[in-house]
Image (cartoon, rainbow, N blue to C red):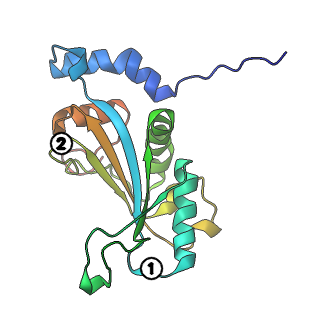
Amino acid sequence: MAKATTVTAPRLKAFYTDTYVKELQAELGLSNVNEVPKLEKIIVSVGIGKNKDDKHHYEVVRNTVTKVTGQSPIDRMAKKSIAGFKIRAGMNRVGLSVTLRGARMYEFLDRLVNIDLPRVRDFHGVSNKAFDKGGNYNLGITDQSIFPELTFEETQHIHGLQVTFVIKNGSKEASKALLVKFGMPFEKEGGAR
């Protein structure tokens, strides 16, 4: 008879449900536990840009996103025509994106905060100004070589990634408090971390 395997929840998700919810409710002065900000999804996207016709560059970007997130990306189509960039509405392969939810989302966040961001050269923390009106946070990564999942050969074509943290019930302050609990290293107000 085969043994049943037990699946454990990701470390950050367990911390969130067991500890962070109560702490955030007290810190933010919220009367209801359902008002506590919650990480809903993480979107990792890459624009192909000027290399939209280069199949090798497309494959490099696709491989990077797949290895970093553990999920196959989808092709993004152009929504508008832009004559200066020679893009027509509906043109395929102007970018790639992945939406992470559940266990994969928490595992990606854990690796990003604890392994990947400390590998950035001259790192002083992430920007405090990258929150939108809904409380979502946008993080731009200029070089994919910070991810240890990629080999040296896979980082020869340098490109960046955009990571968007979609936060439910978040204002700027509430979202920042949630990301600080998860260990996001924000810049100190004076500049250096």
In the figure, is residue 147 to the left or right of 26?
right
Report the residue at 23% width, 18% height from top: 25
Report the residue at 26% width, 28% height from top: 37
- Picture coordinates of residue 103 (x, y %)? 50, 33
**Numbered disc 2: secondary structure:** loop
Q: Identify residue type, mark 1.
A: Asn
Q: Which residue is mark 1?
A: 51
- Picture coordinates of residue 180 (x, y %)? 31, 34
Q: Is residue 187 above or below residue 12?
A: below
| Residue 42 placement: quadrant | top left
Q: Residue furthest right?
A: 1
**First in sequence: mark 1 vs mark 2:** 1
- Picture coordinates of residue 88 (x, y %)? 31, 79
Tally the numbered discs.
2
In the figure, is residue 184 to the left or right of 117?
left
Report the residue at 33% width, 44% height from top: 165
Give the CA separation, mark 1 to mark 2: 32 Å
Q: Identify residue type, mark 2.
A: Gly
Q: Which residue is mark 2?
A: 134
Q: Is residue 50 above or below residue 192?
A: below
Task: State the residue in front, 188 or 80.
Answer: 80
- Picture coordinates of residue 73 (x, y %)? 50, 56
Report the residue at 51% width, 66% height from top: 61
**Numbered disc 1: secondary structure:** helix
